[in-house]
Amino acid sequence: MLGVTSVDLADRRELLDQLEQYYDAVPRSGARVEGFGPLTLFIREGQGWPLYARPALGWSGAVSAADVNRVRARQRELGIPESFEWVAETAPALRAAVEQAGLTVHEHPLMVLGPGVPTPAVPEVADGVLVRTVEPGDSVLPSALAVPHLAFAEPGTGVGAAGLAELGEAVRGCVDDGSVERAAARILAGLTCVAAAVEDSTALCAGQHQPVGAVTEIVGVGTLPTARRRGLAHAVTAVLVADARSRGAKIIFLSAGDDDVARIYARLGFRSVATALIAEPVE
């Protein structure tokens, strides 16, 4: 893991508190919530990315494997992934509890672009590729929603196998399950911004940010595996940052997939401030 940037402890505590408030707020626009003592379970309403459990906002007591297992039983009952997400430095006791419950923990650099960092310039990309935000009703929106699914199915930064044929199939799935309509509604409501690198009317790379007040998280930035190593993710992230700043965001953050991905974001000015943890059952 890349080292966490050295910052004043009081400043980092205030920052992490703001992020905790964001983490608790952002799923509520599309989920119902169930409390399990020290843990909160977010349950997706309708179709879309499955949600997760995380520490209850403001909880400062103990958490046990039994608490984790109660949430897991409810997730199994609902037929949703047994997934937990949290920040290591904010809830240090949770890792031991989820590991005692038999889950595997994955670490990801949690990176922030502070208000004093200049908005990064959008780098040049190949001729014929336009990097821009995507509006409701835009013909690019279906592929912009579909391409991250293919990217995350083949993680990493190297060129992969999935290409335009697989993207076409994924687009049909997004249209059929209502994802495009839901995303368009969120864009109109100001809950989500989508940006994409577009070639021949198709998104080869896309991502989103989701503002809540002065805080926003960049999520789901992914490149079609056959289109990697062209600087597209870098450019899409720069467009998302510019859009977030135009909306008044003071804190822009993200969780990098691994250290190689974190280095891409570091070139845009993001700095590691903590460690995001995801716990899931052993496969």
Image (spheres, helix red, strand yellow):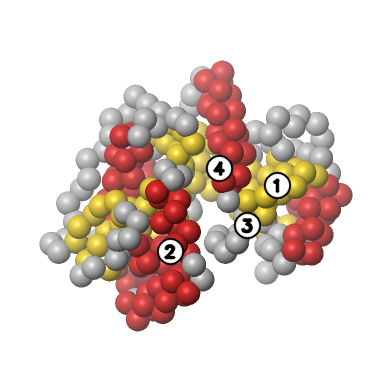
Task: Name the residue tied to disc 4.
Answer: 26
Task: Name the residue tied to disc 1.
Answer: 33
Label 1, secondary structure: give it: strand
Q: Describe residue 140's horizontal placement relative to residue 276 as left or right.
A: left
Q: Amino acid at mark 4?
A: Val
Q: Which label number is shown at residue 45?
A: 3
Image spot of residue 88 (x, y percent): 64, 39
| Sequence-first disc among 3 and 1 | 1
> Can you name the residue that lies furthest to the right here?
66
Q: Amino acid at mark 1?
A: Val
CA distance separating discs 4 and 1: 12 Å
**Mark 3 in CB contact with mark 4 (< 8 angstroms):** no
Task: State the residue at coordinates (59%, 38%).
Answer: 25
Image spot of residue 76 (x, y percent): 77, 64
Task: State the residue at coordinates (70%, 30%).
Answer: 58
CA distance separating discs 3 and 2: 15 Å
Foreground pick, 168 / 276: 168
- 10 Å crowding of disc 2: few (<14), some (14-19), many (20+): many
Q: Amino acid at mark 3?
A: Glu
